[in-house]
Image (cartoon, rainbow, N blue to C red):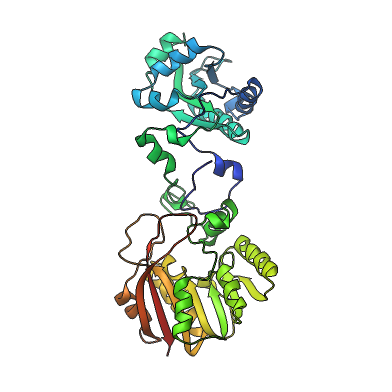
Amino acid sequence: MAQRRMNLQVPIEALFARRWSTYAFDTEKPVTREHLAACLEAARWAPSCYGEQPWRFVVADRFEDEFSWRQILSALVENNQLWAKNAPVLIVAAAEAFFTSNENPNRWAEYDTGQAVMSLCLQATALGLMTHQMAGFDAGQLQTSLQIPEHVHIMSVTAIGHPGNIDNLEEVFLSRELAPRNRKAISEFVYNGKWRNDWEVASGLGWEARYQETAAEQLPWYSPSLDPDIEQALHSISLTSAHVLDLGCGVGTQSVALAKRGFVVSACDISSSAIAEAGKLAEREGVQIDFRVEDILQSQLSGTFDLIIDRGVFHCFSDEADRSVYLTMVARLLKPGGILLLKCFHKTETHQEGPPGRYDEADIERFFSGRFELIRSKTSSFSSPASSFSPKALFCILRRR
Protein backbone atom coordinates (compact mmCIF):
# COMPACT_ATOMS: atom_id res chain seq x y z
CA MET A 1 0.00 0.00 0.00
CA ALA A 2 1.37 3.41 -0.96
CA GLN A 3 2.55 5.60 1.87
CA ARG A 4 0.55 8.71 2.65
CA ARG A 5 1.25 11.75 0.51
CA MET A 6 2.03 14.88 2.51
CA ASN A 7 1.70 18.62 1.76
CA LEU A 8 -1.10 17.95 -0.72
CA GLN A 9 -2.25 20.97 -2.68
CA VAL A 10 -4.91 19.76 -5.15
CA PRO A 11 -7.00 16.58 -5.56
CA ILE A 12 -5.69 14.42 -8.40
CA GLU A 13 -6.70 11.20 -10.14
CA ALA A 14 -6.27 8.31 -7.70
CA LEU A 15 -3.97 6.45 -10.11
CA PHE A 16 -1.36 9.20 -9.86
CA ALA A 17 -1.69 9.37 -6.09
CA ARG A 18 -1.17 5.60 -5.72
CA ARG A 19 1.96 5.45 -7.85
CA TRP A 20 5.13 5.46 -5.84
CA SER A 21 8.56 3.83 -5.79
CA THR A 22 8.62 0.90 -3.40
CA TYR A 23 11.64 -1.01 -2.11
CA ALA A 24 9.58 -4.08 -1.16
CA PHE A 25 8.77 -6.66 -3.83
CA ASP A 26 7.32 -10.14 -3.51
CA THR A 27 10.23 -12.29 -4.67
CA GLU A 28 8.06 -15.39 -5.12
CA LYS A 29 5.24 -13.93 -7.21
CA PRO A 30 5.84 -13.49 -10.96
CA VAL A 31 4.37 -10.76 -13.13
CA THR A 32 2.08 -12.39 -15.66
CA ARG A 33 2.92 -12.07 -19.33
CA GLU A 34 -0.43 -10.38 -19.91
CA HIS A 35 0.23 -7.72 -17.26
CA LEU A 36 3.73 -7.08 -18.54
CA ALA A 37 2.38 -6.74 -22.09
CA ALA A 38 -0.21 -4.24 -20.87
CA CYS A 39 2.52 -2.10 -19.30
CA LEU A 40 4.51 -2.15 -22.54
CA GLU A 41 1.37 -1.32 -24.53
CA ALA A 42 0.81 1.72 -22.33
CA ALA A 43 4.37 2.81 -23.06
CA ARG A 44 3.77 2.28 -26.78
CA TRP A 45 1.00 4.86 -26.74
CA ALA A 46 3.02 7.56 -25.00
CA PRO A 47 3.39 10.81 -26.97
CA SER A 48 6.62 11.51 -28.85
CA CYS A 49 8.05 14.06 -31.25
CA TYR A 50 6.77 13.30 -34.78
CA GLY A 51 5.50 9.98 -33.42
CA GLU A 52 9.09 8.72 -33.50
CA GLN A 53 8.75 6.52 -30.39
CA PRO A 54 12.51 6.62 -29.74
CA TRP A 55 12.34 4.48 -26.60
CA ARG A 56 13.80 0.98 -26.54
CA PHE A 57 13.23 -1.49 -23.71
CA VAL A 58 15.21 -4.57 -22.74
CA VAL A 59 12.94 -6.69 -20.54
CA ALA A 60 14.35 -9.41 -18.27
CA ASP A 61 12.01 -11.66 -16.31
CA ARG A 62 13.74 -13.73 -13.63
CA PHE A 63 11.14 -16.48 -13.95
CA GLU A 64 11.71 -16.80 -17.71
CA ASP A 65 15.28 -15.63 -18.37
CA GLU A 66 17.29 -15.56 -15.16
CA PHE A 67 20.59 -15.08 -17.02
CA SER A 68 19.55 -11.77 -18.61
CA TRP A 69 17.90 -10.66 -15.39
CA ARG A 70 21.16 -11.25 -13.49
CA GLN A 71 23.13 -9.33 -16.09
CA ILE A 72 20.97 -6.29 -15.44
CA LEU A 73 21.00 -6.79 -11.66
CA SER A 74 24.79 -7.02 -11.57
CA ALA A 75 25.09 -3.68 -13.38
CA LEU A 76 23.15 -1.87 -10.66
CA VAL A 77 25.04 -0.06 -7.92
CA GLU A 78 25.39 -2.19 -4.81
CA ASN A 79 22.78 -0.26 -2.82
CA ASN A 80 20.16 -0.87 -5.52
CA GLN A 81 21.05 -4.55 -5.82
CA LEU A 82 20.18 -5.05 -2.14
CA TRP A 83 16.46 -4.50 -2.75
CA ALA A 84 16.08 -4.91 -6.55
CA LYS A 85 17.14 -8.56 -6.22
CA ASN A 86 13.57 -9.27 -5.08
CA ALA A 87 11.90 -7.73 -8.13
CA PRO A 88 10.92 -10.41 -10.68
CA VAL A 89 11.22 -8.07 -13.68
CA LEU A 90 13.91 -5.52 -14.57
CA ILE A 91 13.50 -3.26 -17.60
CA VAL A 92 16.28 -1.20 -19.14
CA ALA A 93 14.96 1.91 -20.89
CA ALA A 94 17.08 3.51 -23.60
CA ALA A 95 16.64 6.25 -26.20
CA GLU A 96 17.57 6.18 -29.89
CA ALA A 97 19.68 9.31 -30.42
CA PHE A 98 18.71 9.91 -34.07
CA PHE A 99 15.48 10.18 -36.04
CA THR A 100 14.98 7.07 -38.16
CA SER A 101 13.53 9.11 -41.05
CA ASN A 102 16.52 11.37 -41.71
CA GLU A 103 19.19 10.32 -39.19
CA ASN A 104 19.27 13.82 -37.70
CA PRO A 105 19.90 14.10 -33.93
CA ASN A 106 16.68 13.76 -31.93
CA ARG A 107 17.07 16.16 -29.02
CA TRP A 108 13.69 15.11 -27.64
CA ALA A 109 14.44 11.38 -27.56
CA GLU A 110 15.33 11.27 -23.87
CA TYR A 111 12.34 13.41 -22.94
CA ASP A 112 10.01 11.13 -24.89
CA THR A 113 11.55 8.01 -23.36
CA GLY A 114 10.80 9.39 -19.91
CA GLN A 115 7.16 9.83 -20.91
CA ALA A 116 7.00 6.24 -22.09
CA VAL A 117 8.46 4.92 -18.83
CA MET A 118 5.99 6.97 -16.81
CA SER A 119 3.13 5.53 -18.89
CA LEU A 120 4.48 2.05 -18.18
CA CYS A 121 4.62 2.76 -14.45
CA LEU A 122 1.09 4.15 -14.31
CA GLN A 123 -0.29 1.10 -16.10
CA ALA A 124 1.56 -1.10 -13.64
CA THR A 125 -0.03 0.84 -10.78
CA ALA A 126 -3.48 0.37 -12.33
CA LEU A 127 -2.85 -3.39 -12.36
CA GLY A 128 -1.86 -3.47 -8.68
CA LEU A 129 1.85 -3.80 -9.45
CA MET A 130 4.68 -1.77 -7.95
CA THR A 131 7.56 -0.08 -9.76
CA HIS A 132 10.82 1.62 -8.90
CA GLN A 133 12.92 3.51 -11.43
CA MET A 134 16.68 3.64 -10.93
CA ALA A 135 19.49 5.86 -12.14
CA GLY A 136 22.20 4.01 -10.19
CA PHE A 137 23.77 1.59 -12.67
CA ASP A 138 26.86 1.04 -14.83
CA ALA A 139 25.71 2.10 -18.30
CA GLY A 140 28.87 0.74 -19.96
CA GLN A 141 28.35 -2.68 -18.41
CA LEU A 142 24.73 -2.76 -19.58
CA GLN A 143 25.77 -1.58 -23.05
CA THR A 144 28.19 -4.49 -23.35
CA SER A 145 26.27 -7.30 -21.65
CA LEU A 146 22.97 -6.52 -23.37
CA GLN A 147 24.58 -5.68 -26.73
CA ILE A 148 23.04 -2.21 -26.85
CA PRO A 149 24.48 -0.05 -29.70
CA GLU A 150 26.61 2.92 -28.66
CA HIS A 151 24.31 5.51 -30.22
CA VAL A 152 21.44 4.32 -27.99
CA HIS A 153 21.51 6.18 -24.66
CA ILE A 154 20.63 4.12 -21.59
CA MET A 155 18.30 6.18 -19.40
CA SER A 156 17.04 4.04 -16.52
CA VAL A 157 16.36 0.61 -15.08
CA THR A 158 12.86 -0.06 -13.71
CA ALA A 159 11.99 -2.82 -11.27
CA ILE A 160 8.46 -4.24 -11.53
CA GLY A 161 6.67 -6.72 -9.32
CA HIS A 162 3.98 -7.33 -6.75
CA PRO A 163 4.14 -5.54 -3.38
CA GLY A 164 6.22 -7.43 -0.84
CA ASN A 165 6.52 -7.67 2.94
CA ILE A 166 8.26 -4.54 4.21
CA ASP A 167 9.41 -6.45 7.30
CA ASN A 168 11.94 -8.19 5.08
CA LEU A 169 13.64 -4.92 4.15
CA GLU A 170 16.95 -3.82 5.59
CA GLU A 171 16.66 -0.94 8.06
CA VAL A 172 17.90 1.74 5.65
CA PHE A 173 15.20 0.85 3.13
CA LEU A 174 12.49 0.26 5.74
CA SER A 175 12.79 3.84 7.01
CA ARG A 176 12.42 5.14 3.45
CA GLU A 177 9.48 2.83 2.81
CA LEU A 178 7.59 4.09 5.84
CA ALA A 179 8.37 7.78 5.41
CA PRO A 180 5.45 9.95 4.23
CA ARG A 181 5.96 11.31 0.72
CA ASN A 182 6.63 15.00 0.21
CA ARG A 183 7.05 17.21 -2.83
CA LYS A 184 7.98 20.82 -3.52
CA ALA A 185 5.09 23.29 -3.56
CA ILE A 186 3.65 24.04 -7.00
CA SER A 187 4.77 27.66 -6.63
CA GLU A 188 8.39 26.51 -6.44
CA PHE A 189 8.44 25.19 -10.00
CA VAL A 190 5.45 26.75 -11.78
CA TYR A 191 5.53 30.41 -12.77
CA ASN A 192 2.63 32.62 -13.77
CA GLY A 193 3.28 34.43 -17.03
CA LYS A 194 6.97 35.01 -16.44
CA TRP A 195 9.95 33.42 -14.71
CA ARG A 196 9.87 33.43 -10.90
CA ASN A 197 6.34 34.85 -10.76
CA ASP A 198 4.69 32.26 -8.50
CA TRP A 199 1.62 30.38 -9.72
CA GLU A 200 -0.64 30.24 -6.67
CA VAL A 201 -2.98 27.41 -5.66
CA ALA A 202 -6.06 27.89 -3.47
CA SER A 203 -5.14 26.52 -0.04
CA GLY A 204 -8.44 24.70 0.49
CA LEU A 205 -7.80 22.27 -2.36
CA GLY A 206 -5.09 20.53 -0.33
CA TRP A 207 -7.52 19.68 2.45
CA GLU A 208 -9.99 18.37 -0.10
CA ALA A 209 -7.24 16.13 -1.49
CA ARG A 210 -6.47 14.70 1.95
CA TYR A 211 -10.10 13.77 2.59
CA GLN A 212 -10.52 12.29 -0.88
CA GLU A 213 -7.40 10.13 -0.68
CA THR A 214 -7.44 8.97 2.94
CA ALA A 215 -10.10 7.27 5.03
CA ALA A 216 -11.10 9.58 7.88
CA GLU A 217 -10.00 7.06 10.50
CA GLN A 218 -6.46 7.13 9.07
CA LEU A 219 -6.05 10.90 9.25
CA PRO A 220 -3.65 12.01 12.00
CA TRP A 221 -6.14 14.47 13.54
CA TYR A 222 -9.07 12.04 13.64
CA SER A 223 -10.69 11.47 17.02
CA PRO A 224 -13.66 9.07 17.23
CA SER A 225 -15.16 10.77 20.29
CA LEU A 226 -15.14 14.14 22.00
CA ASP A 227 -11.62 15.34 22.69
CA PRO A 228 -10.90 14.86 26.45
CA ASP A 229 -9.58 18.43 26.72
CA ILE A 230 -12.85 19.79 25.34
CA GLU A 231 -14.90 17.54 27.60
CA GLN A 232 -12.99 18.64 30.70
CA ALA A 233 -13.25 22.30 29.70
CA LEU A 234 -17.04 22.06 29.27
CA HIS A 235 -17.27 20.55 32.74
CA SER A 236 -14.99 23.20 34.30
CA ILE A 237 -17.00 26.11 32.90
CA SER A 238 -20.29 24.35 33.69
CA LEU A 239 -21.59 24.67 30.16
CA THR A 240 -24.28 22.12 29.35
CA SER A 241 -26.38 23.87 26.71
CA ALA A 242 -25.37 26.49 24.19
CA HIS A 243 -25.21 27.35 20.50
CA VAL A 244 -21.85 25.93 19.37
CA LEU A 245 -19.76 26.48 16.26
CA ASP A 246 -17.27 23.71 15.45
CA LEU A 247 -14.54 25.24 13.27
CA GLY A 248 -12.74 22.83 10.95
CA CYS A 249 -15.08 20.04 11.93
CA GLY A 250 -13.62 17.45 9.54
CA VAL A 251 -15.86 14.40 9.37
CA GLY A 252 -17.94 15.66 12.29
CA THR A 253 -17.06 13.44 15.23
CA GLN A 254 -16.71 16.40 17.62
CA SER A 255 -19.86 18.04 16.28
CA VAL A 256 -21.91 14.88 16.71
CA ALA A 257 -20.57 14.31 20.24
CA LEU A 258 -21.59 17.85 21.20
CA ALA A 259 -25.04 17.50 19.61
CA LYS A 260 -25.64 14.27 21.54
CA ARG A 261 -24.87 16.18 24.72
CA GLY A 262 -27.71 18.62 23.98
CA PHE A 263 -25.84 21.47 22.33
CA VAL A 264 -27.22 23.22 19.26
CA VAL A 265 -24.38 22.75 16.79
CA SER A 266 -23.28 24.47 13.62
CA ALA A 267 -20.11 23.23 11.98
CA CYS A 268 -17.92 24.08 9.03
CA ASP A 269 -14.92 22.78 7.14
CA ILE A 270 -13.07 23.84 4.01
CA SER A 271 -13.40 20.35 2.48
CA SER A 272 -16.69 19.43 0.83
CA SER A 273 -15.77 15.74 1.10
CA ALA A 274 -15.32 16.09 4.86
CA ILE A 275 -18.68 17.87 5.20
CA ALA A 276 -20.38 15.14 3.17
CA GLU A 277 -19.02 12.47 5.53
CA ALA A 278 -19.95 14.56 8.56
CA GLY A 279 -23.54 14.79 7.32
CA LYS A 280 -23.71 11.00 6.94
CA LEU A 281 -22.38 10.52 10.47
CA ALA A 282 -24.95 12.92 11.93
CA GLU A 283 -27.74 11.12 10.10
CA ARG A 284 -26.57 7.73 11.41
CA GLU A 285 -26.38 9.10 14.95
CA GLY A 286 -29.79 10.77 14.70
CA VAL A 287 -28.72 14.34 15.43
CA GLN A 288 -29.40 17.61 13.62
CA ILE A 289 -26.34 19.74 12.78
CA ASP A 290 -26.00 22.69 10.43
CA PHE A 291 -22.96 21.68 8.35
CA ARG A 292 -21.43 24.13 5.89
CA VAL A 293 -18.44 24.26 3.54
CA GLU A 294 -16.48 27.35 4.62
CA ASP A 295 -13.01 28.81 4.20
CA ILE A 296 -12.39 30.44 7.57
CA LEU A 297 -10.29 33.17 5.97
CA GLN A 298 -13.18 34.08 3.65
CA SER A 299 -16.04 33.13 5.91
CA GLN A 300 -19.66 33.90 5.04
CA LEU A 301 -20.89 32.65 8.42
CA SER A 302 -23.38 34.83 10.25
CA GLY A 303 -25.05 34.86 13.62
CA THR A 304 -23.53 34.66 17.07
CA PHE A 305 -22.48 31.70 19.17
CA ASP A 306 -22.04 30.97 22.86
CA LEU A 307 -19.14 28.63 22.24
CA ILE A 308 -16.65 28.11 19.43
CA ILE A 309 -14.55 24.95 19.21
CA ASP A 310 -11.26 25.11 17.32
CA ARG A 311 -9.43 21.81 17.41
CA GLY A 312 -6.78 22.33 14.75
CA VAL A 313 -7.62 25.40 12.64
CA PHE A 314 -5.67 28.27 14.20
CA HIS A 315 -2.34 26.44 13.99
CA CYS A 316 -2.71 26.23 10.21
CA PHE A 317 -1.89 29.94 10.10
CA SER A 318 1.71 31.01 10.57
CA ASP A 319 1.19 34.26 8.66
CA GLU A 320 0.29 37.29 10.77
CA ALA A 321 -2.24 38.57 8.22
CA ASP A 322 -4.08 35.23 8.22
CA ARG A 323 -4.12 35.16 12.03
CA SER A 324 -5.60 38.66 12.02
CA VAL A 325 -8.40 37.59 9.67
CA TYR A 326 -9.06 34.54 11.85
CA LEU A 327 -9.20 36.65 15.01
CA THR A 328 -11.61 39.15 13.46
CA MET A 329 -13.88 36.35 12.25
CA VAL A 330 -13.97 34.57 15.63
CA ALA A 331 -14.57 37.81 17.53
CA ARG A 332 -17.43 38.66 15.16
CA LEU A 333 -19.15 35.30 15.60
CA LEU A 334 -18.71 34.88 19.36
CA LYS A 335 -21.04 36.64 21.79
CA PRO A 336 -19.50 38.95 24.40
CA GLY A 337 -18.68 36.64 27.26
CA GLY A 338 -18.70 33.66 24.92
CA ILE A 339 -16.03 30.97 25.13
CA LEU A 340 -13.42 29.87 22.59
CA LEU A 341 -11.87 26.45 23.18
CA LEU A 342 -8.64 26.42 21.21
CA LYS A 343 -6.33 23.44 20.67
CA CYS A 344 -3.19 23.82 18.57
CA PHE A 345 0.31 22.44 18.14
CA HIS A 346 2.67 23.50 20.93
CA LYS A 347 5.82 25.45 20.13
CA THR A 348 7.89 22.68 21.73
CA GLU A 349 6.69 20.15 19.11
CA THR A 350 9.57 19.89 16.65
CA HIS A 351 8.33 17.02 14.49
CA GLN A 352 8.44 18.08 10.84
CA GLU A 353 5.04 16.63 10.05
CA GLY A 354 2.22 18.91 11.06
CA PRO A 355 0.93 22.48 10.76
CA PRO A 356 3.17 25.54 10.29
CA GLY A 357 1.83 27.42 13.31
CA ARG A 358 3.11 26.27 16.73
CA TYR A 359 2.44 28.36 19.80
CA ASP A 360 2.92 28.70 23.55
CA GLU A 361 0.86 30.57 26.15
CA ALA A 362 2.75 33.84 25.59
CA ASP A 363 1.90 33.69 21.88
CA ILE A 364 -1.79 33.18 22.57
CA GLU A 365 -1.79 36.06 25.09
CA ARG A 366 -0.18 38.32 22.48
CA PHE A 367 -2.40 37.31 19.55
CA PHE A 368 -5.74 37.40 21.39
CA SER A 369 -5.18 40.29 23.83
CA GLY A 370 -7.67 43.13 23.56
CA ARG A 371 -10.58 41.03 22.32
CA PHE A 372 -10.17 37.93 24.48
CA GLU A 373 -9.18 37.03 28.02
CA LEU A 374 -7.11 33.87 28.46
CA ILE A 375 -8.88 32.02 31.27
CA ARG A 376 -6.73 28.91 31.35
CA SER A 377 -4.16 27.04 29.30
CA LYS A 378 -2.36 23.74 29.60
CA THR A 379 0.01 21.54 27.67
CA SER A 380 -1.64 18.51 26.13
CA SER A 381 -1.35 16.34 23.03
CA PHE A 382 -3.20 15.30 19.90
CA SER A 383 -3.89 11.59 19.74
CA SER A 384 -5.35 9.44 16.99
CA PRO A 385 -6.15 5.73 16.71
CA ALA A 386 -4.27 5.74 13.38
CA SER A 387 -0.94 6.78 14.85
CA SER A 388 1.28 6.06 17.83
CA PHE A 389 2.67 9.57 17.50
CA SER A 390 0.93 12.10 19.79
CA PRO A 391 2.23 15.58 19.00
CA LYS A 392 2.45 18.12 21.81
CA ALA A 393 -0.45 20.52 21.97
CA LEU A 394 -1.54 23.67 23.75
CA PHE A 395 -5.15 23.81 24.95
CA CYS A 396 -6.66 27.17 25.88
CA ILE A 397 -9.93 28.50 27.25
CA LEU A 398 -10.52 32.08 26.13
CA ARG A 399 -13.43 34.41 26.90
CA ARG A 400 -14.66 37.06 24.49
CA ARG A 401 -14.49 40.49 26.13
Please report the residue visible at 56 percent of the width from the left and 28 percent of the height from the top: 116
Q: Which quadrant is home to the C terminus?
A: bottom left
Q: Residue at x 62, y 71 (%)?
A: 292
Q: Nearer the viewer, residue 225 or 181?
A: 225
Res 23 → quadrant: top left
Frontmost residue, 236 versus 78: 236
User: How many numbered badges does the structure rendering display?
Assistant: 0
Could you say which quadrant of the image residue 365 lies in?
bottom left
Residue 10 percent coordinates (x, y): 55, 53
Q: Is residue 193 left or right of residue 267?
A: left
Q: Is residue 56 visible?
A: yes
Give how far across and how far down residue 302 sits, in percent: 59, 82
Residue 122, above or below 67: below
Vertical side of 31 occupied by 199: above or below: below
Q: Visible in this render: residue 136?
A: no
* Relative image position of residue 108 (x, y in whole percent): 50, 27
Residue 201 image position (x, y, % from top left) = 51, 57
Toward which corner of the image does residue 138 lie, by quadrant?
Answer: top left
Q: In the figure, 326 relative to 132: above or below?
A: below
Looking at the image, which is closer to me, 9 or 285? 285
